[in-house]
Every structure is written in C-alpha cells, then in structure tokens.
Amino acid sequence: MKAAGRTGAVITLAGALALVPITAPTAQAADTGITVSRIVINGGKPVVVVGTHDVREPSLTFRITLPSGYSTANPFAYTAEPFLYHDTTPAKGGDSGGLYSAGYTCYETSSRIADCEGALRIDPYYRLDSNNDATTWKVAVVARLWKTNGQLKTEEYTAASGRVQIKRWAKATVNASPEPVRKGKTITVTGSLTRADWVKHKYTGVASGLARLQFCKRGSTTYTTVKSVRSSSTGALKTTVKASVDGYWRWTFGGWDTTGSATSSGDYVDVR
C-alpha cells in the first residue's frame, strides 16, 4: 500500500475479495498500534444483494493512523484494511471465508495519518460457497507491521462495530393470458419467483414466497394490489382474475431477511 499526498503519486493495493454496506466506528489493532477509523462501506447503505455471477464492488473509505515511530511515507512498514466475516472471531473469519477489499488507494494527510478510498469486492461464483452466506456479516480490521527484511513483525485481527446483511438476489417473471381478452372473461396470470443459489450457481425457485399480484390501468403509472399468492415448492405463481379494462399485470415480492425483494416487468393485456 502506498500513502501519498493528494498531489503525489498514488499506488493501489490489490487485496483479496470483499464486499459490504454500512458505517463502522473505529477499530483498534492493539498489538500493532495501528488504528483504523472512519470506516464507511457502500455509502452507508445497510443491505447488499448478490446474484450468482455478477461481481459487486461497494465503495470503501477509511483512515489509517500509525503508531509513533512509523510513517505513511514508508509503505513497506505496515498494511491495514477492513473486511467482512461471519465466524466466531475476526481471525477465524478472516482465514476462512472472509471478504476483503478489491483494492484501495491511500493519501497522506500527515506523517502518521492516511485517508484511504477504494472498493470492496464480492465474486459470488468463487467467494460464496453456501447459501448460509446470506446472513449478517460483521466488520473487522486486519493490521500488520513488517520488519525491514520483509518478514512479518506482528499481526492483529480486530472486530469493529457494525453489521452488514448480505442477501440473495431474487427475480420475478409474469405472463398474463389470453391476449387480447373479452371484458368479463377470465385472465390467468402466471409467473415464477427465483433467487440466487450460491451452491448451484444458478437461480432456483423460492418456495412459499408471498407475492402480490398488481395491476396498472392503461395511461396510469400507479400499480395497485389485487390479491396475494404463495409460490409453489418450485417457485411457480398462478392465479386468475376477471378482465375489466386494458392494463398491465405484474408480480412483486417483498423479500426476506436472507433474500432480496423482486418485481417483474408489467405484462399488458388488451381488453375488448
């Protein structure tokens, strides 16, 4: 990692993989004397929803304060960065499944203080190997001091206040038929509710998800709920309604603690 003034050279540290969303207070690495503070992840947003393949890179900013005797001008003497974990301790979580930064750049503000900015990163295909990873993640800091010969001098994993709820991305589809339909006749509205499966690396059905069937009249932009339906064991949605006026039909799902919300596009039905 390189600490430099705003007008000086800037070098980015490419770390492991990571993610998050929230603001976490100061974390103190006692054995190193390094303080990491002002941790802000994903602009302070509380939830990250992740799919099966798309990489997510929430923003990351933090401040590093070095102990007496160390200088930000010596980038080989120290490293420090926030990460996410959900094991019993930061050290265990960091070693097994911790989510680290994609990279960040630090700018010197004084001889022992540097402000850093970059991104955390999560690649669900490689970093999330269980659907149990859809849970509350904790924030921690790993700090290290290095000897002049490049050997590790001391290392400290320290918990920071703050939590991040990582959810599985959900999708909804819709199909209303027949099209067109005579006024007063029955319209059958079907669809599906699926979510990211981090073991199978594809979207699989959400069972017993409560989805609302909504309708928007032609010429309007407002959807209203007509009825609610539970999805089948495979995530299928199906119900019937009477045709009255032209408009759009859609399914919307509010989500769960481990699963994000989802709303389908609108399917237009011409009523004659």
Image (cartoon, rainbow, N blue to C red):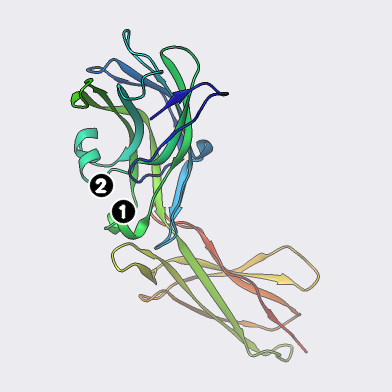
Image quadrant for the N terminus? top left
Q: Is residue 46 visible?
A: yes
Residue 129 in percent (x, y) is at 27, 58
* Picture coordinates of residue 109, whole percent (x, y): 50, 16
Where is residue 42 drawn, in percent x and y? Answer: 49, 40
Q: Quadrant of residue 204?
A: bottom left
- Mark 1 crowd level (few <14, some 14–19, many ≥20, 10 Å Cα): some
Q: Residue at x 36, y 31 (%)?
A: 81
Horizontally, is 241 left or right of 26 in the view?
right
Query: Mark 2 or 1 closer to N-term?
Result: 2
- Determine whether 90 is above or below 124 in the image: above
Q: Are marks 2 and 1 in contact (CB under 8 Å)?
A: yes
Label 2 amino acid?
Answer: Gly
* For residue 10, side relative to residue 128 (left or right): right
Q: Which residue is mark 1?
A: 127
Q: Which mark is residue 97?
A: 2
